[in-house]
Amino acid sequence: GDSVTQMEGPVTLSEEAFLTINCTYTATGYPSLFWYVQYPGEGLQLLLKATKADDKGSNKGFEATYRKETTSFHLEKGSVQVSDSAVYFCALMPKGGGADGLTFGKGTHLIIQP
Amino acid sequence: DAGVIQSPRHEVTEMGQEVTLRCKPISGHDYLFWYRQTMMRGLELLIYFNNNVPIDDSGMPEDRFSAKMPNASFSTLKIQPSEPRDSAVYFCASSSAGPIQHNEQFFGPGTRLTVL
């Protein structure tokens, strides 16, 4: 079945550091890919998405590029802030029409220190 | 719009008791999803509805779990009887299918369930 693997956390960085959170997937065909963010005590919010190969999703300084050849969708940000501290989830949705449920990775807890 | 509304936000109960979690999706959304989040298993899709009809319940862990959607603005997830291993955060999400596939799912704040 479909699956998403993302790097284990927690990831601890200093403010203004460069961020990469790795995500790889296994799926039939070409799914759509997503990054969701969960701030403490809240539900998940969509951060960015990409629906086909070589698409780049971007939002709030975060970027991720859909790499079909490596089945990856790594999340990057050039300069992180304390307010970016949260849990980040990589997810996929299979092609096939409709609005099927998302398959999530385990999540990566990001801690940004001032 | 108020977003997806879930109640209660926290629930503490004893093993063997019935638990009912509630969800109000965003008005106009025709898909509703129930997810469970635990440290061990991460986020898992339990069941989802389209136009109030259950489409895929393969993620429901066992017969103790049931979900209903009597109308477009309300859904329940029931656990009877509850067990300590059901302790988790349960999320409801909704989305609107349209001409564009893979529309964004909007999540509620979750219900943190603790079964003693």
Image: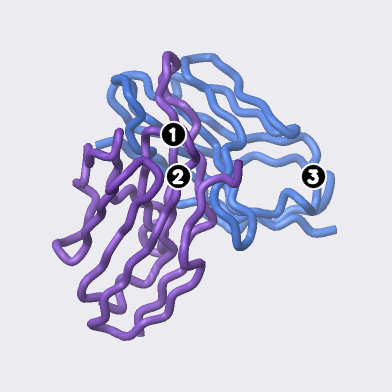
Chain colours: A blue, B purple
The CA distance from mark 2 to mark 1 is 7 Å
Return the x and y of residue A7 as percentages of the image width and height: 51, 47
The numbered mark at residue B25 is 2
User: Of the residues shown, which amino acid type is indicated by label 3?
Assistant: Ala
Q: Residue at x 75, y 55 (%)?
A: A112
Packing grade of label 1 (10 A; few <14, some 14-19, many >=20) is some
Q: Residue at x 36, y 29 (%)?
A: A99
Packing grade of label 2 (10 A; few <14, some 14-19, many >=20) is many
User: Of the residues shown, which amino acid type is indicated by label 1?
Assistant: His
Q: Residue at x 26, y 75 (%)?
A: B18
The numbered mark at residue B29 is 1
- SS label for mark 2: loop
Question: Mark 3 — on which chain does it sit?
Answer: A
Tally of numbered discs: 3
Packing grade of label 3 (10 A; few <14, some 14-19, many >=20) is some
In this view, B65 is above or below A29: below
The CA distance from mark 2 to mark 3 is 38 Å
- SS label for mark 1: loop
Mark 2 and mark 1 residues within 8 Å of each other at the beta carbon: yes
The CA distance from mark 1 to mark 3 is 39 Å
